[in-house]
Every structure is written in C-alpha cells, then in structure tokens.
Amino acid sequence: EMLRSLVGSEMCIRDRVLTMVVENPKYFYSPGKLLLTGEYVVLDGAKSLAIPTTFGQTLNITSIPEQVLRWQSVDVNNNIWFQADFILDTTSKVVTNSTLEVAQRLTQVLQVVCDLNDGFKDNFKGTLAITELEFPNNWGLGSSSTLINNLANWAQVDAFKLLKQTFGGSGYDIACAQHRAPILYQLNEGLNISKEVSFKPSFHKELFFVYLNKKQNSRDSIKHYRSVPKDTLRNVLSKISKLTERVLTANSVQEFSDTLNKHETIISQLIKTPTIKEQLFSDYPKTIKSLGGWGGDFVLVVGNPEDKIYFKEKGYHTILSFAEMIA
C-alpha cells in the first residue's frame, strides 16, 4: 500500500517523468541507486554491479520575479523540508540567507557548478528550483547523487566532475543516475566505465529488500575503508570482479546465494567488520547481502514471502520486493 501511494496506480513514475521531460525542457529526472556487489572495493577498480532503482529525484526549474535563485526541496510526502535563497555577491561568490547545514552544503555545490560553467550565474536572478524525492530521504537510495546529476544536466556540466569536487566517491551512483538499466561499473585509470547488462534472474521473486531503519553515512564508510592497507587489496579486487560476473550468470538461487555469501565473507575480512547477518540476523537460514556501506540502508535478502514475517517481528517493516525496487 505504501509503495502504491509513492509510485501511483497505473502508470510508472519513470514513464510519467520521461513524458514530462519532453514537454518541459527544464524538468530533470535521475533514478536512485543500489550497489549490489563491489562495495568499498569499487573505489579501487573492482568490477561492480550497480542498479538504478524505480525511485528517483526530480528537479523542476521555473521563473519568479524575485532576483534570487530560490531553492525548495520537497519530500516524498509533498512537504517542503528545506528552502533557501541564493545570490552572487560582488565577487561572484555564492551566498545564502540560511544558516542551515544543508544550505551551506548546497552553497558549496552551486559554487562548483558556477566554476564549471560561468554561464550558470545567470540563474541566480529570477529562478525557482524545486527538487522532489520519490523516496524517504533516509532510505539511502541516492538523494545526493540524484541531486548532483540533475544539477549537472541543468547546468550542462560533467556530473562526475561535479561529484568529484563536492561529495566525492567512486561515481557508481552518478552512473546509475544516468542509466535506466543495471550496469557493470568500474573505475579504470580515472575513467568511469559503465556497461548496461540484464539483471532479472528467474528466481527474482525469491529476492527482496529490507531497510535497516537507519541511513548509513557513506563518507564515514569510505573513510573507514581507506584505513585498509593497500597491499591487502591486491587479490581482493580480482576476486570481487569475478564474483560480480558470477552474480549475473547464476542459474539458480543456490548458486546466487553461494556467490553473495563468498562476497560477504571477503569484504568482512577486508574491513574487519562482521557481516550484517552475523550482527543482526544470525538465526536467519538464508542469504543476506549488504548493499553499499555496511551497517545501514537496505540489504538484499533471499527468501520467500513468508520469510518477510521474520524481519517484521524484529522491527523491520520497510520491505520491498524485487519488482518494487528494480524496474
């Protein structure tokens, strides 16, 4: 019921958005992201499976009489949770009327946009920018990456450059925002390489996603990973890349589960952190896979519909099927 209220009854949000893009060139849309394989090691060149989600974020640009860039952020319940005005001072530095942390962060991002495209400065007079999330902002599906990609599309700048100079990271989330299908993603000598692949296994009805009731700060996760000695990574990168390929070719839920379990064990040993199954669900008999930074956001679970009861009884009530999360 919750999902239907988010997505709509008959027409998929993505279909509606693509139609609106044609009708309004100042309307931008980016899907959210999940990192199915390669968490952490994607930063060092491991081949990873990244998946755009059915949920994303929009950016709508309109004109207003006030001589400012007015920013409004709307949540999934259609409430404005953030609003601020931005202008350029006499030195062309972006300033804002808000002292909120999110306003200061956005000021920095907008400044980088101006640095990348000097013509963007024209938007600081008479412009209203409205962002709308299609998912709760604590789900960890890419509220930042979808914003960066939408901003980059609006300003006609390189989204990967904008990410590098603002939030940082591997860029897989930007790649997801730019695709409408699962991708194999890899960093190779500074290049962001994406290849669309098919990922809808025959047993996809035996897969679902459980939200762990807290958002994981990816910057903290990356900082923790960076403390791992570089020589420890030498064999890990090739192993994870091979497991990523096996995930795509798995012909049975057992082969799929075995591959994910091996992946979890390798990353657990690498970052010296127990798997999420060991931490929270040790008595669950089937496979559980962390997605992205360990300890929060969503996990992928192998199980039947009746297995969802196990998680609900433990207090995890946000559970989405494969079809609900992945188009």
Image (spheres, rainbow, N blue to C red):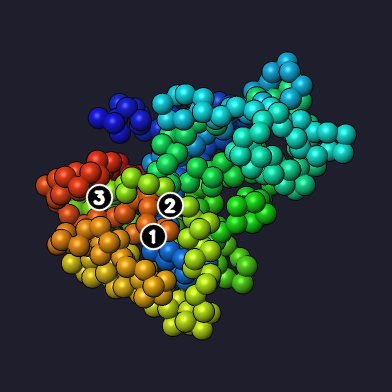
Comparing marks 3 and 1, which lies closer to the viewer? 1
Q: Give the residue number, with chain letter if any, for mark 1.
A: 294
Relative height, residue 263 to residue 314 (above, below): below
Relative height, residue 105 to residue 282 (above, below): above
Q: Position of residue 209 (x, y in %)?
A: 28, 49
Question: Residue flagged by tag 3: what amino acid is it?
Answer: Phe
Asked whether, in this view, residue 24 is left or right of residue 317, the answer is right
Q: Residue at the location (58% across, 45% down)? A: 149
Relative height, residue 33 to residue 264 (above, below): above
Give the residue at the far left of this rendering. 306
| Quarter that holds the N terminus | top left
- Cβ–Cβ under 8 Å for marks 2 and 1: yes
- Local packing at callout 1 (Cα closer than 10 Å; few below 14, some 14-19, many 20+) is many
Relative height, residue 260 to residue 152 (above, below): below
Of residues 118 and 319, the one drawn nearer to the viewer in this rendering: 319
Q: Position of residue 140 (x, y in %)?
A: 43, 47
